[in-house]
Image: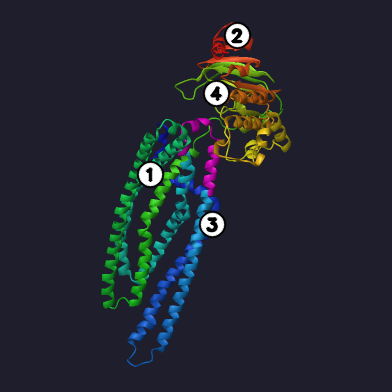
C-alpha cells in the first residue's frame, strides 16, 4: 500500500537538523534541564567525595594502624576510622536522597517536553485536510501520537541529559585519574577507544533495526484498528480465520524486527563487558606492580579503582544512550514527517475577508472540477447555484460525485479548477473553521462521540445556548426520545453511538445541526438507512430544519426531494439534467427512469 511506504523513513545515522528540531521543544523548559544538571552535578560531587574518603581512610588511620608498633594504643586510629565511616555513611544517605531528586526531576523534565510535542502533533493533525487522512489508516496515525511520541520520552527523560553530563563526567574523572597516577591513567586512556569502537560499530545496525521496528508496529496497529472497526463485517462473513492469519503475518514481521534488535544487544553487551574486563585487568596488574614499587599507595589505588568504574560506566552505557538516541531518531523522523505535511486546504491569515452577516447565503459552483488524485478527475465542470433560502437536491448513482460536491462545499478539499463562492466570495479566501460554522451537516451515518447526549449536541460551540438546544430538541422531535432515556440529556453515549438506533442517531444529528442556528444545511443521504416510519419523523424534522435556509440535499430516495427548488442529476461527475421534480419527469430522461424504478411497484 502507498501509505506503508511512509512508515519507514530513512536518513543519516546522525541527523543534526533533526536533533536541533527536537531541541526546540526542549528550549522552553531550559530551567528544568538546568535543575537536572544541578542534581546530577551534586551526585557526581558526592561520588568523587566517596572515592576521596576511601583514599583518606586507607592511607590514614588504616595504614597508620598497620604500621604502628606492636602493643601500641590503636584507639586514636580506630576513632578516626569510625569518623570516616560515619562521613561515608552520611554521603550514602545524601546520595540516596539525591537519587530521588534525580529521578523526579529528570522524569518531570522529559514529560514536560513530551507533553508539548504530543500537543503540537495532535493540533497539527487536526488542521490537516481530509486528503491526508484518506491516504493513511487511523491505527498508523494513532501510533505516531502515542507510541512514537512516547518513544521520545526516554530521550528527554534521561538520554539527552545523561549523555551530555556523561561527557563532563568522563573529562573530570580522567583529569583526577592522571592526578592520582599518570601511568595507570595512560593505560586506561589507551584502552578506552576499544569501548568507543564497539559502540560505533553497534550504532549503524541499531538505527536500521529501530526504523524497521517502528514501521512494523505502525502497520500492525493500522491493521488492528481496521479490523476492530469492521468487526461486524468480519463476523457476519466468517472472516475470522483469514483476519487472524493476516494479523499473525503482521505480528510475525514485528517479532522478526524485534529479534534483530535483540540480537544486536546480545552481541553488544558481552563485547562491551569483555572490553571493560580487559581494562580492569590491566589496571589491576599494573597497579599491583606500582604498589610493590611503592610508587602508588593502597589508598590511591582504591580511589583510582572506584574512579575507574565511574569512568567506565558512562562509556559502557554509551551504547545504550546511543540506542535511545537512535530509537528516538527513528520515531522523530516519523513525527516530523507528519508535522512537515502542509494542509492543502489551509486557513487564511486575512480573517477580515470572512462573511460576517448571518442569514441564508447565495452559494455558487462555477465550472468546478476536482480529483482526489492527479490521475483521475471525479468532478467535471459542474456549474450551479443555491439561491438564498432555496433547496437544491443532488441525485445520481453511487460514485457519481454527490458526496464529493458536499466535501467541496465544506472545504474539506479545494477544487482543482473553477471556484465555489459564498455571497460572491471564493471559499479559498475564507477561513475553513469560520466557514464551517455557518453549515449544519446531517450525514447518512452521523458520528456520535463517547460521552453524554448533551456533549454530542452542544459540541462546545459558543453559539449553542440552553434555549437554542431546547428549541432544537422540540423542533426535531428528539425530546420525546430523550424523555425515555435514563438521564435525558445527561444519558451516556457509547463509542460511535452504538447504543442508539440509526433513526435515533439521525434525530440527534438533526438536533445538533439545528442547535447551532446554521445558515446552510447539508443533508447527505440523511434518510437512506431508516425505515419508513422513522423516515416520516425525520422528514418532518428536516422540513423545519430547511425553512429560511439555503440547503443542499443528497438523496437516493427521490420521495425526499420532491419539494426541492432545483434537482440536479449527476452522472460520472457531470450534471446531465436539472430542473424541478415535475420538469424532470416530463423530460423523460435519467431522473424519470430513476423515479420509475423506485415507484413502479407503488
Closer to the camera in the image, 517 or 52 = 517
Q: Is residue 184 above or below residue 108?
A: below
Would you name the residue on which mark 2 appears? 585
Looking at the rendered structure, which numbered label has been put on residue 32?
3
Q: Secondary structure at mark 4?
A: helix
- Closer to us: mark 4 or mark 1? 4
Real-space CA distance between mark 3 and mark 2, rounded to the nearest whole angstrom? 74 Å
Mark 2 or mark 4: whose residue is earlier in sequence? 4
The region drawn magenta spans 115-140
Q: Secondary structure at mark 1?
A: helix
Real-space CA distance between mark 4 and mark 1, rounded to the nearest whole angstrom? 38 Å
Mark 1 or mark 3: whose residue is earlier in sequence? 3
Instruction: State the image coordinates of residue 550 (x, y, percent, origin top left).
Output: 67, 22
Quadrant for the N terminus in the image: top left
- Closer to us: mark 2 or mark 4? 2
Closer to the camera in the image, 278 or 14 = 278
Closer to the camera in the image, 89 or 582 = 582
Mark 2 or mark 1: whose residue is earlier in sequence? 1
Q: Give me the residue at 51% from left, 63% from top.
A: 101
Would you name the residue on which mark 1 appears? 213
Q: Secondary structure at mark 2?
A: helix
* Residue farthest right in this picture: 467
Disc 3 vs disc 2: Cβ atoms closer than 8 Å?
no
Instruction: State the image coordinates of residue 527 (x, y, percent, origin top left).
Output: 59, 24
Disc 4 vs disc 1: Cβ atoms closer than 8 Å?
no
Q: Count numbered badges in the picture.
A: 4
Looking at the rendered structure, which numbered label has been put on residue 403?
4
Mark 4 or mark 1: whose residue is earlier in sequence? 1
Q: Give me the residue at 27% from left, 67% from top.
A: 281
Amino acid at each position: 500500500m502507498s501509505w506503508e511506504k511512509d512508515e519507514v523513513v530513512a536518513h543519516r545515522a546522525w541527523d543534526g537538523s533533526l536533533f536541533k528540531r527536537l531541541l526546540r521543544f526542549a528550549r522552553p523548559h531550559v530551567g528544568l534541564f538546568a535543575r537536572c544538571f544541578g542534581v546530577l552535578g551534586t551526585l557526581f560531587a558526592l561520588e568523587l567525595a566517596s572515592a576521596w574518603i576511601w583514599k583518606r581512610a586507607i592511607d590514614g588511620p588504616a595504614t597508620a594502624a598497620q604500621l604502628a608498633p606492636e602493643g601500641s594504643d590503636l584507639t586514636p586510629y580506630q576513632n578516626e576510622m569510625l569518623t570516616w565511616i560515619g562521613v561515608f555513611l552520611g554521603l550514602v544517605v545524601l546520595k540516596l536522597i539525591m537519587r530521588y531528586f534525580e529521578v523526579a526531576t529528570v522524569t518531570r523534565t522529559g514529560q514536560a517536553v513530551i507533553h508539548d510535542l504530543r500537543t503540537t502533533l495532535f493540533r497539527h493533525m487536526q488542521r490537516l485536510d481530509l486528503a491526508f487522512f484518506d491516504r493513511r489508516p487511523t491505527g498508523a496515525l494513532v501510533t505516531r501520537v502515542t507510541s512514537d511520541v512516547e518513544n521520545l520520552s526516554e530521550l528527554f527523560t534521561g538520554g539527552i541529559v545523561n549523555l551530555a553530563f556523561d561527557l563532563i563526567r568522563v573529562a573530570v574523572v580522567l583529569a583526577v585519574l592522571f592526578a592520582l597516577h599518570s601511568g595507570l591513567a595512560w593505560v586506561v586512556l589507551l584502552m578506552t577507544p576499544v569501548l568507543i569502537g564497539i559502540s560505533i560499530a553497534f550504532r549503524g545496525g541499531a538505527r536500521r533495526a529501530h526504523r524497521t521496528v517502528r514501521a512494523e508496529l505502525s502497520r500492525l496497529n493500522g491493521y488492528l484498528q481496521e479490523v476492530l472497526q469492521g468487526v461486524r463485517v468480519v463476523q457476519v462473513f466468517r472472516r475470522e480465520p483469514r483476519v487472524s492469519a493476516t494479523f499473525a503475518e503482521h505480528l510475525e514481521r514485528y517479532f522478526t524486527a524485534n529479534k534483530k534488535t535483540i540480537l544486536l544487544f546480545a552481541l553488544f553487551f558481552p563485547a562491551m563487558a569483555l572490553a571493560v574486563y580487559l581494562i580492569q585487568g590491566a589496571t589491576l596488574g599494573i597497579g599491583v606492580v606500582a604498589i610493590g614499587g611503592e610508587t602508588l599507595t593502597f589508598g590511591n589505588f582504591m580511589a583510582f579503582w572506584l574512579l575507574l568504574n565511574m569512568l567506565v560506566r558512562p562509556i559502557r552505557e554509551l551504547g545504550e544512550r546511543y540506542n535511545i538516541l537512535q530509537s528516538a531518531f527513528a520515531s522523530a523522523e516519523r513525527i516530523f514527517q507528519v508535522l512537515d505535511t502542509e494542509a492543502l486546504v489551509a486557513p487564511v491569515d486575512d480573517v477580515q475577508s470572512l462573511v460576517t452577516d448571518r442569514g441564508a447565503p447565495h452559494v455558487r459552483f462555477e465550472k468546478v472540477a476536482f480529483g482526489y488524485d492527479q490521475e483521475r478527475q471525479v468532478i467535471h465542470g459542474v456549474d450551479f447555484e443555491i439561491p438564498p433560502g432555496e433547496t437544491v437536491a443532488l441525485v445520481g448513482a453511487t460514485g457519481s460525485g454527490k458526496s464529493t460536491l458536499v466535501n467541496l462545499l465544506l472545504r474539506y478539499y479545494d477544487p482543482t479548477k473553477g471556484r465555489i463562492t459564498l455571497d460572491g466570495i471564493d471559499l479559498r479566501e475564507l477561513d475553513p473553521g469560520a466557514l464551517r460554522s455557518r453549515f449544519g451537516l446531517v450525514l447518512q451515518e452521523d458520528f456520535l462521540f463517547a460521552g453524554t447526549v448533551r456533549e454530542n449536541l452542544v459540541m462546545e460551540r459558543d453559539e449553542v445556548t440552553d434555549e437554542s438546544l431546547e428549541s432544537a430538541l422540540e423542533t426535531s422531535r428528539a425530546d420525546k426520545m430523550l424523555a425515555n432515556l435514563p438521564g435525558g440529556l445527561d444519558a451516556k453515549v457509547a463509542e460511535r453511538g452504538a447504543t442508539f438506533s440509526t433513526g435515533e442517531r439521525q434525530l440527534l444529528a438533526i438536533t445538533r445541526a439545528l442547535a447551532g442556528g446554521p445558515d446552510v444545511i447539508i443533508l447527505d443521504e440523511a434518510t437512506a438507512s431508516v425505515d419508513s416510519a422513522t423516515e416520516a419523523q425525520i422528514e418532518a424534522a428536516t422540513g423545519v430544519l430547511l425553512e429560511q435556509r439555503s440547503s443542499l440535499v443528497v438523496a437516493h430516495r427521490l420521495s425526499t426531494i420532491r419539494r426541492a427548488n432545483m434537482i440536479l442529476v449527476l452522472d460520472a461527475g457531470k450534471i446531465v439534467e436539472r430542473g424541478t421534480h415535475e420538469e424532470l419527469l416530463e423530460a423523460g430522461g435519467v431522473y424519470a427512469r430513476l423515479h420509475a424504478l423506485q415507484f413502479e411497484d407503488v
